[in-house]
Amino acid sequence: MTAHSSTSRGKARDHHIGMIVPSSNLTMETELPRMLRAREGEDPADRFVFHSARARMQHVTPEQLRAMNEQSTRAATELADARPDVVATACLVAIMAQGPGFHCTAEGDISRSLRAEGSEAPVVSSAGALLSGIEALAARRVAIITPYLKPLTQAVVEYLEDAGITVVDSLSLEVPDNREVARLDPADLLQHHRTLDLSTADALVLSACVQMPSLPSIQPVEDEVGIPVLSAATATTYRLLSELGLKARVPGAGRLLSGDVSPAVA
């Protein structure tokens, strides 16, 4: 993997990041830039520029999730015009609800749309990134928190277990309106995780959803529980930085983004 968009030696490099997000998403375009702005504060040699395309989805239902996936190639075609260095598609459950391994299909479809428009940007899905993050942490047993209704949480559990990851416990917050998910207070996660049995867990997925805010709680919860804590958003950031050939380091965002975890691709 090679860093992109380098300017002359010694000057800052701009990395253009394309994002495909649900139309109702309010969090991916705040948490991901917040992490990368924090990284810029530590290493101003790398700067990050963001470009988004939206796919219509208001409620987290199987029908709307399928319809949103069908819009991904159109969104990718639009992003290709911006010539991004990497593209992230950022609705984990939209992919996982389609059945095990579907992130490979989704990433392949988006890649083909980009290539057709002359873009060679690698593609990252939040679903595939979560698998990569768990693998990179050498975790085989995880607990998860989701904002979804229980049937969709079960789909996430089955997706992870098909990939060889045991889900030892899960918590569904059961919020079907995607905009309401974005309004959940990340501070509540400081209590929610205490309802989970972490006694045999290797890692905790504090938010298995890029729409559910969690960033302010990642490091405090990790410090409390003593095992790595990650989210769909931190895992996506990990993969983006890895694809750009950059050290995956973001201060205060958990072990996965400590800069000490070697890349792994699911």
Image (spheres, helix red, strand yellow):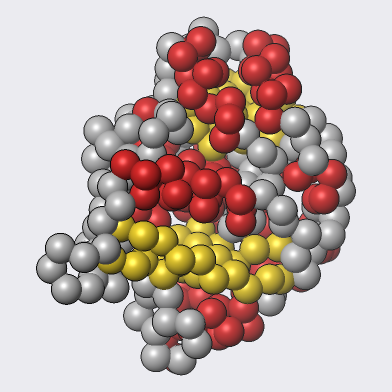
Left or right of residue 243: residue 232: right
Q: Nearer the viewer, residue 113 or 168?
A: 113
Q: Relative to residue 240, is residue 168 depicted above or below?
A: above
Specify the quadrant that holds the N terminus: bottom left
Q: Which residue is painted at 42% across and 23% down in the image?
A: 228
Residue 97 image position (x, y, % from top left): 68, 53
Considering depth in this image, is 70 or 83 the residue closer to the camera?
83
Give residue 257's position: percent from left, percent from top. Answer: 37, 37
Identify the image quadrant of residue 263.
Answer: top left
- The furthest residue to the bottom: 117
Q: Residue at x 53, y 27 (%)?
A: 218
**Relative to residue 195, is residue 262 depicted above or below?**
below
Residue at 26%, 56% in the rendered image: 45
Give the answer, above or below, for where 151 lies relative to 36: above
Point 68% across, 57% down: residue? 94
Q: Position of residue 28 (x, y in %)?
A: 61, 52
| Relative vertical location of residue 106 with respect to residue 59 in this rendering, above or below | below
Residue 203 appears in the picture as rendered: no
Q: Quadrant of residue 146?
A: top right
Q: Position of residue 230 (x, y in %)?
A: 49, 32
In-image side of 139 versus 23 (left or right): left
Q: Is residue 225 left or right of residue 156?
A: left
